[in-house]
Structure formats: C-alpha cells, structure tokens
Amino acid sequence: MTMNYSDYEIAFSRARLGKYLIASNGDSENAMILYRCNISLCQKFYPLLNVFEVVLRNAINAHYKRVFSDSDWIRHQLAPNGMLENHPHKNAVERIIRNLDDKGFYSSDKVVSSMTLGFWIHLFSRRPFALGGQSILRVFPQRDKGLGQRVIYNELKTLKTFRNRIAHHEAICFDPRGVKSSAQALANYLLLTKYARFLGYDEALLFDRLDTNPYCLLKEIDNL
C-alpha cells in the first residue's frame, strides 16, 4: 500500500502541496518525493539548531555573568538604564520571571533556559551591544579577523529566520521566488558550522553522533 498524490492532498492540503507540484513541473510523483525530502532535510537541521542554540545562550550567559559580576544579570538588567531596559522581549521576560516567582521555582538558570533564540540574538544589535560594553563578540573567540557586530548580528538573524521556518513546518527547499533550490539550506548549514567554530568548537565533535550531514539530501533535491 502506498499513498498517491490525491492521498497527499487530503493529508497535507492542496494549497500546501501546490508549490511542490509547480516546482516539479506538474510531476506528482516528484512533488511527493520533494515534499518528503523537505521533511527529511528539516530533520537534519533540527539537532544542529538545537545544539547551536544551547551552546550560544550558555556562552552569552557565562560572558555577561562575568561582565556584570552578577549570576542573575538578566533580571537585574531589565531595570531602568539596564542593558535590557528597551529589549523588544522585555515584557515576555518579565512575565516568565513573575511566573517562576509565583510558583516558587525561580532561579537564574531557569530564566536562561526560558529565553528564546530571538532574545539572545537581539543582544548583538547595536544598542545592547553598546550597553554591554561592546564586549559580546568575545563569545566568538575564533571568529574571522575583522568580522564586526553588524555582520554577526545579520548572520545570526538569518539563522533565526531559517530556524523559525523549520519550527513552523515551512519549506526550506525553495529560493525566495519559490523555485526549487538547495542553496538556502546549504548556506544556512555553512553558517551554522561556521558559528560553531567561532564559538571555539570543532563542529565534528560538537555534533558527534548526530545525523546532521545534509549533502546527500541537497543533491537529491537538486536532481529531482
């Protein structure tokens, strides 16, 4: 028993599958293969993004604990004139802190683990970068010489956008025009491994035992 394209349309919706059918020039069999390849490609990236997000936030947290001589720096930097006073996630952070306080579960570690990737990446934007003593780039001790705050912030935002596409079950096998392409996924894979190295890790060791190499899938997508 196998699913045909009509079964796929019932399961996943005609609107969702339409872009895959167009990219496959109306070949419904290839459209189903491309759809499955996209899901498999997202599976490859999920552990990479999971590991990267954890090691990035831990590096930033360790850095600012030293800079502010404060293990609870997130809570205290929300105050007036603090680095996080105008952070776009400030209200969400304050709600998390109140909920932890109310439940009697508060700890600085729980706050750190509750922050989103967007919270951490915003710390590389111009205002927090300045208020943090222009020091946050030290979390990337192996970054390329001359690579500055603006480029790093923009590249991390690119990774966040890519991560959100995967989290929201969107396609990552198309270019911005909707044309089938492995280029976006490949570019983000290279960014992820580059920033793992910038953090001071050997990416082969950091991602050891994780099935994260996307090259065969990227080739399959290109050849469909």
Image (cartoon, rainbow, N blue to C red):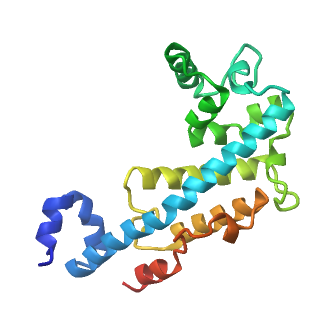
Q: Is residue 205 above or below residue 29?
A: above
- Quadrant the C terminus occupies: bottom left
Q: Quadrant of residue 43?
A: bottom left
Specify the farthest residue to the front: 104
Residue 64 horizontal side relative to residue 109, left or right:
right
Residue 28 location (% of width, % of height): 20, 77
Instruction: Report the front residue among 216 and 5.
Output: 216
Residue 149 horizontal side relative to residue 94, left or right:
right
Q: Is residue 94 above or below residue 167?
A: above
Q: Quadrant of residue 170?
A: bottom left
Residue 107 location (% of width, % of height): 63, 25
Q: Residue at x 56, y 38 (%)?
A: 116
- Number of numbered tags placed on the structure image: 0
Specify the farthest residue to the bottom: 223
Q: Quadrant of residue 30?
A: bottom left
Q: Residue at x 63, y 34 (%)?
A: 112
Instruction: Report the front residue among 129 and 199.
Output: 199
Q: Residue at x 83, y 60 (%)?
A: 142
Residue 179 location (% of width, % of height): 40, 71
Residue 172 location (% of width, % of height): 44, 63
